[in-house]
Amino acid sequence: MANGKFQIPKAINEVIDSYAPGTNSRKTLLNTYESMLKESVDIPMFINGKEVRTNDIRDCHPPHDHKRKIGQFHYGTKKHVEDAINSSLAVHDEWSSLPWNERAAIFLKAADMVSGVYRAKINAATMLAQSKTVHQAEIDAACEFADFLRFNANFMQEIYENQPVSQEGLWNRMEYRALEGFVVAITPFNFTAIAGNLPASAALMGNVVVWKPADSQIYSSWVIMEIFRKAGLPDGVINLVYTDGPSFGEVVFKHPSFAGLHFTGSTSVFKHLWKEIGNNINLYKAYPRIVGETGGKDFILAHSSADPAEIATGMSRGAFEFQGQKCSAASRAYIPESLWPDVKNILIDQVSSFKMGSPGDPSNFITAVIDERAFNKISGYIDEVKLSSDADIILGGDYDKTNGYFITPTIIKAKEPLFKTMCEEIFGPVLTIYVYADSDWSETIDLVNKTSEYALTGAIFAKNRNVINEVTHALRFAAGNFYVNDKPTGAVVGQQPFGGARGSGTNDKAGSILNLLRWVSPRTIKETLVPPTDYKYPHMG
């Protein structure tokens, strides 16, 4: 084994490609998209490094063109989950004992593959399967995913270098062990980067992982797994299975070696899983680590000193990029009466100019929501507003699922601050605005804080520095990621570590050292260099 004090290459955030007209990158990406659109791929599970196929075959369809089949995936059973667990545990000792620099090398190579030879493919997969525009796919699948892999390697080194002091005659050391057992990663549809990071961050720290992605994100998960395997990830370290949630949970959460859950998804599901883990606590060898990033009802609060154009742009981007399907998306806004006429005009002008359609057309700002279930839920909220006397739709409100799950960006003006769409997570292109009297400023701050069970992201727009300071303090528990004069979306790895509290999760900050610390179990080692040979202490004479 090589000896040396190794240094991880300093992580630098991946540069976002513009894909401007006439660029080679634009041509390459669109050609890759069109090629993959015409293909029909067969996507297996991956257990112990082997492709696993079953007789339960499910089709993959682009949300924006749901009559077109782009592939199929093989659905598993409880037996496949058991096999995945056994495979992971079989390699636990070997993987966790591998020198940290060797583990880092795998994921650093994967990062370069994501940002290099696989850039077009992983972006195109995300465009196809999740209906992300060129820009949204780029900042997610290529850039953020590569950032997670590179920065996590840096954070790992920083953790290992954190060692206790030693007094004369002693040598104190801290060993950062992998968890004893396997980690479960349950990942969402909306971010390819999150889907890759949740299993990878735990694996980087020496853990073995059983990974279940959302059914609507399996296409890009398959690409992620291909990258990991080609980067040199040993068989069994990350096992990828596709099953229904109850069957999966029945196996993993009742296994004695269940060691941790890395989750991104809905608040209700996370609470259910937490309860299940608690009910099974006597089964486990050790107390499991539970890490979750869940829902949000993210806010924009505007003060009368703010610039109307800045507010409107923060709302149009923050609410409607990726069809509002970000847990950080601006979903409720509080605008002072004095600014509302100007903000309204600018906002309507901006949103009315959005083009909607296939992500294969880079000029489109809006594409489809993820699936029919989401479509029905979002359109149901819109229908309720149409029937209500407590709110008005001032723009949008249309939807059509004939060929794709398209919902026009919808802006609602609520007459009551606690109207349903001001309080509940919708997860779609719907923004609700409450216009408050300028004189009710203090009451409005309190309203923002108490309206929702969530505390993920939020933003204040103001020019007055005293106001910014006031709100930053008053809403310190209302958002884990807080933005000043900016939309409440777009957290960058290493710059704005992401996560919220209350009903939004455990706030373990993906994109920081804090998250990786959850995947190690420290052991203190004290070595006495010259042990005493007499039991007596000096005070005994």
Image: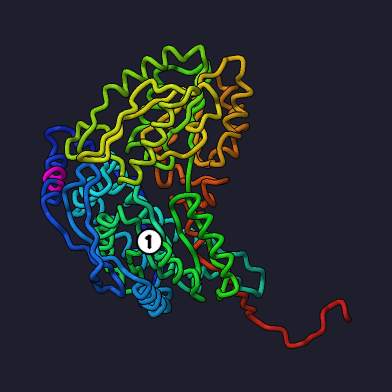
Quarter of the image for the N terminus: give it.
bottom left
- Magenta region: which residues? 28-33
Q: Where does the image place residue 377, in percent across and percent down from the top left?
A: 39, 41
Which residue is rendered at x = 46% and y = 50% of the image?
A: 266
Magenta stretch: includes residue 89: no
Q: Where does the image place residue 72, in percent across and percent down from the top left?
A: 20, 60
Which residue is rendered at x = 41% and y = 59% of the image?
A: 186
Could you tell whether 496 is left or right of 239 in the image?
A: right
Q: Where does the image place residue 98, in percent across and percent down from the top left?
A: 39, 74
User: What's the amino acid at mark 1?
Assistant: Ala
Q: Where does the image place residue 26, in percent across and percent down from the top left?
A: 15, 39
Could you tell whether 86 is left or right of 287 in the image?
A: left
Element assignment for label 1: helix
Quarter of the image for the C terminus: give it.
bottom right
Q: Is residue 230 visible?
A: no
Work out whether residue 170 or residue 211 is closer to the camera in this orientation and state it. Answer: 211
Could you tell whether 414 is left or right of 528 in the image?
A: left
Could you tell whether 43 is left or right of 378 in the image?
A: left
> Which of the 4 quarters of the picture holds residue 345?
top left
Most extreme residue toward the right is 541
- Residue on which the image places disc 1: 200
> Which of the 4 quarters of the picture holds residue 30?
top left
What type of secondary structure mainly makes up the magenta span?
Answer: helix
Q: Residues within 10 Å of mark 1 (few under 14, many from 20)?
A: many
Examine the rendered structure and indicate whether residue 25 appears above or below residue 172: above
